[in-house]
Amino acid sequence: MPTPQPNSRHCFVCGLANAYGLHLRFYDNSPGEVVADYTVSENYQGYPGVVHGGIVAAMLDEAAGRSHMGGDPPRFLYTARLEIRYRQNVPVGQPLRLVGRAVKSKARTAMATSAIYGPGDTLLAEAEVLLIDIPGLQMSPEDLAELGWKVYPEDVQSID
């Protein structure tokens, strides 16, 4: 059974207080693997009916990074390299599945892959990501609380 990962307050991808954000919810599916099911609204389209490529990149980036976040405390990393292959148009208004997988982890760096699947498990976009620990970042429980970093009930779609 997938375990919910925390959300934050202001992150564009997962922040529940970000009025312009995607509000994605990620789940630990297995060690080093996260999933998120999501339907992108037309507010994030580029061409009619197609998710903007920058939004696709943001979703792939977040899924990859979250594959390494499952510890306590969570491991926060930034993206040093994001290589995307757009296979097909990512549609708005249709159920999508994001999958992030940890590939390897070193003391200061990590590698991950991520993918977006559409109807019929069709691969729509995929990425390889090099991640680096945020230098000097040690998050206390108080710092995490300030970020709103916690698991919110499923019926909570946004927070103030």
Image (cartoon, rainbow, N blue to C red):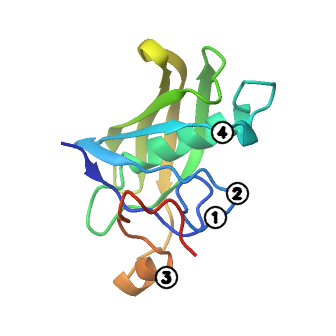
Q: Which mark is residue 146?
A: 3
Residue on which disc 4 sits: 41
- Compute the Cα span from label 4 to label 1: 15 Å
Q: Judging from the image, what secondary structure is the residue with disc 1 in?
A: loop
Q: Give the percent coordinates (x, y) of residue 97.
A: 44, 30
Q: Earlier in the sequence, mark 3 or mark 1?
A: 1
Amino acid on which the number 3 mark rests in the picture: Glu
- Compute the Cα span from label 2 to label 1: 5 Å
* Residue depth check, mark 4 versus mark 1: number of the one nearer the observer: 4
The residue under the point 36% across, 55% down is: 69
Q: Judging from the image, what secondary structure is the residue with disc 2 in?
A: loop
The residue under the point 58% across, 47% down is: 80
Q: Give the percent coordinates (x, y) of residue 95.
A: 50, 29
Residue on which disc 1 sits: 18
- Compute the Cα span from label 2 to label 4: 11 Å
Residue neighbourhood size for the residue with mark 3, other residues' Cα within 10 Å, grouped as few (<14), some (14–19), many (≥20): few
Q: Earlier in the sequence, mark 3 or mark 4?
A: 4
Q: In the drawing, does residue 20 fall left or right of residue 141?
A: right
Amino acid on which the number 1 mark rests in the picture: Asn
Amino acid on which the number 2 mark rests in the picture: Tyr
Give the image quarter of residue 18. bottom right
Q: In the drawing, does residue 14 fall left or right of residue 107?
A: right
**Dots 2, 1 in contact, CB < 8 A:** yes
Q: In the drawing, does residue 51 fall left or right of residue 4?
A: right
Q: Which mark is residue 63?
A: none
Q: Give the percent coordinates (x, y) of residue 17.
A: 59, 68
* Residue depth check, mark 3 versus mark 1: number of the one nearer the observer: 1
| Location of residue 108 with respect to 95 vertically, above or below | below
